[in-house]
Amino acid sequence: MQNLIICALLLAFISPFICIGFNVTIDAYNVIDFGAKGDGKTDDSQAFLRAWESTCGAEGMRSLVIPQNYKFLLSPLKFKGPCNASSIQIQIRGKIVAPAKNEWVSYYFTWILMTNVNGLIVDGSEGLIDGLGSTWWPCKPCQRPSVITFNACNDLRVSNLRIVNSPRSHINVNDCVNAIFSAISIHSPVNSPNTDGFNVYASKNIWIRDSTIASGDDCIGISGNSSYVNVTGIACGPGHGISIGSLGKGSDNTAEQIYVQNCNFTGTTNGARIKTFPNGSGYARGITFEQIKLIKARNPIIIDQFYDDYSPTDKGVEVSGITFRGFDGTCVHDEAITLNCGPQGCFNITLDQIKIVSYEQGKQVYCSGKNAHGTVTSTTPNCSCLSP
Ligand SMILES: *[C@@H]1O[C@H](CO)[C@@H](O)[C@H](O)[C@H]1NC(C)=O
Ligand SMILES: *[C@@H]1O[C@H](CO)[C@@H](O)[C@H](O)[C@H]1NC(C)=O
Ligand SMILES: *[C@@H]1O[C@H](CO)[C@@H](O)[C@H](O)[C@H]1NC(C)=O
Ligand SMILES: *[C@@H]1O[C@H](CO)[C@@H](O)[C@H](O)[C@H]1NC(C)=O
Ligand SMILES: *[C@@H]1O[C@H](CO)[C@@H](O)[C@H](O)[C@H]1NC(C)=O
Ligand SMILES: *[C@@H]1O[C@H](CO)[C@@H](O)[C@H](O)[C@H]1NC(C)=O
Ligand SMILES: *[C@@H]1O[C@H](CO)[C@@H](O)[C@H](O)[C@H]1NC(C)=O
Ligand SMILES: *[C@@H]1O[C@H](CO)[C@@H](O)[C@H](O)[C@H]1NC(C)=O
């Protein structure tokens, strides 16, 4: 065990040379002290679990340190709470790598699971998590694991985390209340299947901010009973954009109070998207996308109530109170805006201050829609298909 000293310096205004410092000591547990080798070959997961048990079981503020200049190979592992520690910080300074596909002995839905830990702080400065996805991607029908899942973790803070090459989605946020993710960097190739950046599910009061996401699927997907989700300052692309849904199957079929602001979509297939299954139930309401920059986004604005299925239907997910405001930039597909609502209609749709042009100079783009109701102001291309 070693002590970690955090020194916070408060600079006085009077003179830049006067500073008042104080030390806060948090007991830190270093995985090396629990037998981790960090040579990239030895499976260090048991050592990590021993370090976790000590960290979680102790009282007070605790810190788990994954040190720099090591590469830790970990088989699937679970960091389980509740903990005695009042707050736990995990510092990822070194590199963490997953085993290759043929070394997984059985299927796990996620490689790293953090479950039932409240007040968790994860800081990944200098660290890197590599899911070794390239060993999985060729097998599209395989059940592939996500890299990290936060399940039932309330009051969560995750920052400066760098994740690459997930076999499936990079970060799952399931059943969490109050979480902030900042300065997250996610990178998987454009053709890697189902590699969502974030997947927010059944969670509330979530803020994902100031992050960079390049992937083969949604940069951020928000679904299944999620509410009060803010997404700000995201550079998304390549990828499929930021999506709400798919909603409509099962009881986890709602999404509301979602606010996406100040995001860039660069070379994405979609941009701001709401997708629901036909003949489903539930709702998507109170959803705003604003201040969005588009650089060669294929189809930047989409409401699609026929996701994955075009069968005729007489009922569907209720879509209402949806605002797209302040979109600016270029698209690739001629159909820049798609508002494809089911026969029951989408209501209270607002399009405002939108200027989307083709990336090919002089080429016309258009808006297409059916059963969509709401108001359009200052929008190019014009959306005359939207009725009051
Ligand atoms: C903080 O810790 C350092 C290193 O142990 C020590 O030199 C310094 O005096 C401490 N400062 C205060 C304000 O306690
Ligand atoms: C919390 O502390 C109690 C009492 O020391 C101990 O029995 C228990 O195992 C600890 N919990 C965890 C998760 O380690
Ligand atoms: C989301 O943003 C709104 C408006 O800026 C703010 O009032 C709200 O507290 C934010 N919520 C979260 C969960 O960050
Ligand atoms: C979006 O692009 C603009 C212009 O290139 C840039 O100034 C801004 O920082 C970008 N924002 C994000 C969130 O990446
Ligand atoms: C979603 O919310 C509904 C209604 O509150 C509830 O019946 C259902 O169990 C929830 N599902 C999940 C997965 O949270
Ligand atoms: C719609 O769903 C209901 C039950 O959920 C089912 O009975 C009906 O056949 C479905 N209709 C279509 C067109 O799929
Ligand atoms: C329309 O949507 C806006 C934005 O979500 C919301 O504030 C307003 O209450 C909605 N109005 C109606 C009549 O549903
Ligand atoms: C809207 O755009 C279409 C296709 O570009 C065009 O034919 C139509 O005249 C436009 N309507 C208005 C009112 O500008």
Image (cartoon, rainbow, N blue to C red):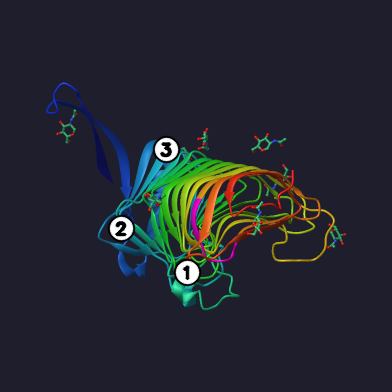
Contact (Cβ within 8 Å) of mark 3 with mark 2 = no
Toward the viewer: 145 or 40? 145
Dot 1 falls on a residue whose secondary structure is loop
Left or right: residue 305 compared with residue 213: right
For numbered disc 3, what is the local secondary structure? strand
Residue under pointer 3:
87
Q: Tell me if I can see residue 169 in this picture.
A: yes
Percent across and percent down for residue 86 are: 43, 35
Q: Amino acid at mark 3?
A: Ser
Q: Magenta stretch: residue 334 in it?
A: yes
Q: Does the magenta run of residues contain 204?
A: no
Q: Quadrant of residue 322?
A: top right
- First in sequence, mark 3 or 2: give its number: 3
Left or right: where 338 falls relative to 152: right
| Residue 378 position in % (x across, y down) | 58, 45
The kind of residue on which mark 1 rests is Val
For ligand 7, which image quadrant applies?
A: top right
Residue at numbered disc 2:
94
Camera-side residue of 46 and 231: 231
Badge 2: few (under 14), some or many (20 or more) residues near its Cα, within 10 Å? many
Disc 3 versus disc 2: nearer the observer:
2
Side of 231 where 374 appears, left or right: right
Identify the magenta region.
328-335
Quadrant assignment for the C terminus: top right
To which residue does mark 1 refer?
A: 190
* Magenta span: chief secondary structure: strand
